[in-house]
Image (spheres, grey):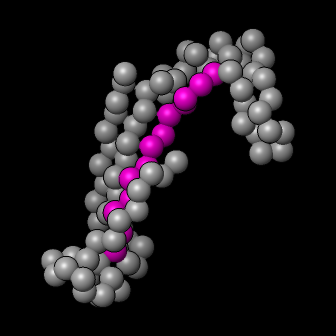
Amino acid sequence: MCTGVQPWFGSTKWTMLSTTGGFVLTCMTGIAQCEDSVDYNVVFSQLTTTERANCLKDPRYLTWRMMTVKVQYTGTIDWYRTDSHWD
């Protein structure tokens, strides 16, 4: 899930994106809940007892990671950073 897209204009503000700039993307990953399954073929089905137990043991459960990526206009990744958060 990406929460933000921001243009990056390089060293000179408001220049053409295609010459010096690109975009900065901020995305999150993690497991928010272990009750329902979100399957694109069957919407919101209940997890089985085994699936729920495995979900609760998964280290991604309630551990969110934020990844920020700077991408050139041509699609080349300049840099990225991943940070973890645990509440």
Q: Is residue 29 magenta?
A: yes
Quadrant assignment, res 42: top right
- The correct choice, above or below, for 61 with respect to 24 in the image is above
Q: Main secondary structure of the magenta part?
A: strand
Count of number-bearing discs:
0
Q: Residue at x 38, y 53 (%)?
A: 26
Q: Is residue 1 left or right of residue 39?
A: left
Quadrant assignment, res 28: top left
Provide residue 58's location: percent of width, then percent of height. 54, 21
- The correct choice, above or below, for 23 with respect to 31 in the image is below
**Residue furthest out toward the right:** 42
Residues shaded magenta:
22-34
**Picture quarter with the C terminus:** top left
Q: Residue at x 33, y 43 (%)?
A: 82
Provide residue 61's location: percent of width, then percent of height. 51, 24
Provide residue 86's location: percent of width, then percent of height. 36, 24
Residue nearer the viewer, 82 or 6: 6
Q: Residue at x 48, y 24 (%)?
A: 62
Q: Is residue 14 magenta?
A: no
- The correct choice, above or below, for 63 with respect to 80 in the image is above
Q: Is residue 82 visible?
A: yes
Residue nearer the viewer, 13 or 48: 13
